[in-house]
Amino acid sequence: MAVPTAYRDLVARAGNRLVLTYNPFEAGCLWLYAEAEWERVRDSVMAQPNTQRVVRTLQQKLVGSAAHLELDANARVSLPASHRAAVGIEKKAVLMGMGGKFELWSEQAHRALIQQTLSDEDLAGGLLDLTL
C-alpha cells in the first residue's frame, strides 16, 4: 500500500515505522499507529487486568495481532496477507486519518460505513449539542 502524499510527512516524523492491528469494534477495518502512539495504546491495554474475557479479547486483537511495518523508499508498506484477508481488503482500500491513528477500511466496509446515517437516538448523551 502506498501512503498518500498528504500523510507522508506525518509518517516520516514517526520514523517511517507504523504498527498495524485489528479494529476490535468494527469489521472491515484495520488500525495503523505511529510507533510511539502505538506504545502508549499497547501499554494502556496491557495494564488492564485480564480476568475479564472482554479485556483478554481486546488484548489479543490489538496487541497479540499487531504487525510492525516500515515504509520503503517509495513510501509504501507491505500489509500482511492475514490482516488483509481478515477484513476483506483485496485490491482497493480506504485510508482515513483519525487523529492519533489511521483507519484502513476495505472498500466494501467503507462504503457501508458512509451510507449509514445517525438518528437523534444515536446522538444521545450530549452529542446533540455538537455544532458540526
Image (tube, helix red, strand yellow):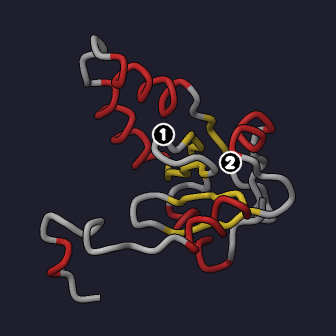
The answer to whether residue 69 is left or right of residue 22 is right
Quadrant for residue 39, please give it: top left
Camera-side residue of 91 and 122? 122
Of marks 1 and 2, which one's residue comes earlier in the chain? 1
10 Å neighbourhood of mark 1: few (<14), some, or many (≥20)? Answer: some
**Residue contact between numbered discs 1 and 2, judged by CB atoms under 8 Å:** no
Q: Position of residue 22 (x, y in %)?
A: 56, 40
Mark 2 lies on a secondary structure that is strand
Vertical placement of 52 versus 39: above or below? above
Give the quadrant of residue 98. Answer: bottom left
The answer to whether residue 124 is above or below residue 65 is below
The local crowd at label 2, few if under 14, some if 14 to 19, many if 20 or more residues have their Cα within 10 Å, is: some
Q: Quadrant of the C terminus?
A: bottom left
Dot 1 falls on a residue whose secondary structure is loop
From the image, which quarter does the N terminus lie in?
A: bottom right
Q: Which numbered tag is attached to residue 24?
A: 1
Q: Position of residue 84 (x, y in %)?
A: 75, 44
Q: Is residue 117 left or right of residue 32?
A: left
What is the number of callouts on the image? 2
**Badge 2 is on which residue?**
70
Q: Residue furthest right?
A: 91
Q: Is residue 75 left or right of residue 29?
A: right
Type of amino acid under label 1? Pro
Give residue 20's position: percent from left, percent from top. 59, 44
Could you tell me which residue is drawn at 19 percent across and 66 percent down? 124
Which residue occupies 68% across, 48% down?
A: 70
Q: Amino acid at mark 2?
A: Glu
- In this rendered view, identify the residue nearer to me: 76 or 125: 125
C-alpha gap between disc 1 and disc 2: 23 Å
**In this view, the mark in front (1 or 2):** 1
